[in-house]
Amino acid sequence: MAPGPGALPVPLLVAAAREAQGPGRRRRLPAARALQAAGEVLAVAAGLKPALLWDCGPAGPAELRRYLGRLREAGLAAERLHVLAMGGSALVLRPGLARDRLHAHPVPLVDVSAARRGPALCGPSEARAVRRHLAALLGHLRDAEAAGAEPVTASEVVASGWNLCTVAGVLLGYPAVYTFAEGAENCLALTPLRVFTARASCPRIKDGLRVQICSFSVPESLCAELRDVLDAWCQQLKEAFGAQSDFVDLCISSEVVSLPAVAL
């Protein structure tokens, strides 16, 4: 039986996240951020999103595997999980959901290359290279899943020539994903962006803890064109939320922002 609200050992969750920061970290991870990290992993395990991009320090696959093992010992995230190292980043995946995501109907790609006057949806020919990379990643995950039966597995994919922002966005479950030509620049500076955020309460970890399930943006100018996929994402999240019991009080909100610079 799953622990009830407040039953999980919060100090253990905090200590485990701090250990996963990796050696040599001068500043300890704040306890509030450590509990958020546990909640985000739980959101993956609960099927609310296919993946999580780890951003609590430069932890590698070994540190993340130990961290997820500690969460399992605490009674959290009992489902099978996979740590994927990709281009210097690490993601925590629920393998089945991640594979379904990569195998599903193509995700709309929004070209935000710096040379453009403004963001625009990619056509089939422009998206061909990204589709090849997603197919290669799907094959990698299938092989990795077949190679190990442990509750927490890990692998590293060679992402030479990949647009990691685009591939990660697909894995994270965004309904539309940014892509751009080589280089770090993009055309989103001062462009009105509609930012969608989904949050929910997680009393299983701690009473009053609000966890960000996901957050992404799409250009406001493309919202009407993307309305069907945005509505489908919202409906799928609500259905997944109704099928689990770890989170309560789902809230999906959006706001329009314009920033002087946007890092992808």
Image (cartoon, rainbow, N blue to C red):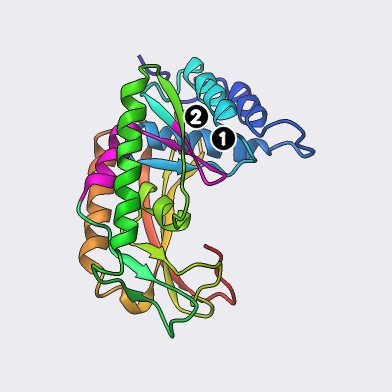
Q: Name the residue under label 1.
A: 35
Compared across the picture, whether 216 is left or right of 69 comes to left
Above-or-below relation of 170 to 220: above
Above-or-below relation of 186 to 131: below
Of the residues tagged 2 and 1, which is closer to the observer? Answer: 1
Q: Give the range drawn in magenta.
A: 83-104
Q: Mark 2 points at which residue?
A: 205
Measured from the top left, where is residue 144 in percent x and y? 37, 28
Measured from the top left, where is residue 248 in percent x and y? 36, 39
- Rounded to the nearest angstrom, the CA distance separating label 2 from label 1 is 8 Å
Question: What amino acid is at disc 2?
Answer: Ile
Q: Residue at x 54, y 41 (%)?
A: 54
Question: What amino acid is at disc 1?
Answer: Leu
Asked whether disc 2 touches disc 1, contact meaning CB atoms under 8 Å apart, the reply is: yes
Compared across the picture, whether 220 is left or right of 70 comes to left
The quarter holding residue 230 reads: bottom left
Magenta span includes 72: no
